[in-house]
Amino acid sequence: MTCSCGECGRYSPHELRRLQVPLTFVTLHPFDDGNGRIARAIGDLLLARADGSPQRFYSLSAQIQRQRKAYYDMLERTQKGTLDVTEWLAWFLDSVHRAVDQAQHTLDAVLLKARFWQRWAATPLNERQVKLLNRLLDGFEGKLTSSKWAAIAKCSPDTALRDISDLLGRGVLRKNAAGGRSTSYALNDLPE
């Protein structure tokens, strides 16, 4: 089998044939239901065996779930085309790379959060502060204002302002540049 995608050259012919197994399974469609799930599980199994590691931190199944439409489009093109699997293999390997990138992104976020809490472990915080700091660490959408704090923490605006002022004083939060009614807050410099 020959491949012109540029990625496949790093794999032996035996490995490339193994990467075709999920495609072959889903194309044969031996069951009334669940063929796609089984094919993705087979792909994960074959990748786990190829990694040669007892631990895997990425999921091909989860990545394919995130890009379902592209997955079904690629299946259809491959199954209804000339049965040349080059495009499928390139897509499949690209999906593996995206799954690894996603796992790296998740790991970076977890480590950042762990370092943050390690840094502030000795600082006494109330439940509202912990809740809102976790929201900020998890990627809060928009700008955090005292009114949003009050709404999320289900507390009065005065309590929200006291919570925020306490965190500003400790150096956990910082005020963003705009002031007045548009005053917003962000986490102070996060540990590297």
Image (spheres, helix red, strand yellow):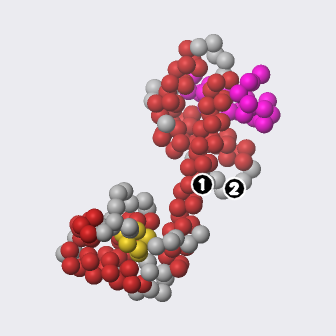
Q: Is residue 94 visible?
A: yes
Which amino acid lies under the numbered mark 1 shown in the image of this protein? Gln
| Quarter occupied by the C terminus | bottom right
Mark 1 surroundings: few (<14), some (14-19) or many (≥20) residues within 10 A: some
Q: Which residue is mark 2?
A: 54
Residue 115 marker: none
Percent position of residue 60, x then y: 58, 42
Quick check: 32 above or below 59?
above
Query: How many numbered badges does the structure rendering display?
Result: 2
- Whether residue 134 is visible: no
30 up-or-down from 118: above or below: above
The amino acid marked with disc number 2 is Pro
- Element on which disc 2 rests: loop
The quadrant where residue 83 appears: top right
Residue at 53 percent across and 42 percent down: it is: 63
Residue 7 located within the stretch drawn in magenta = yes
In the depicted view, which residue is nearer to us: 113 or 161? Answer: 161
Q: What is the magenta range?
A: 1-29
- Spatial CA distance of label 2 from label 1 is 18 Å
Which quadrant would the N terminus be assigned to in this image?
top right
| 78 on left or right of 130 | right
Residue occupying the point 42% across, 84% down: 170
Judge whether 114 appears above or below 23 on screen.
Answer: below
Q: Is residue 149 magenta?
A: no
Query: Which residue occupies the foreground of this view, 127 or 156?
Result: 156
Task: Tell me which residue sits at (49%, 76%) in the image.
Answer: 117
Callout 2: 10 Å neighbours few (<14), some, many (20+)?
few
* Camera-side mark, 2 or 1: 1
Give the overall secondary structure of the magenta segment.
Answer: helix
Residue of label 1? 104
Q: Earlier in the sequence, mark 2 or mark 1?
A: 2
Q: Nearer the viewer, residue 108 or 20?
A: 108
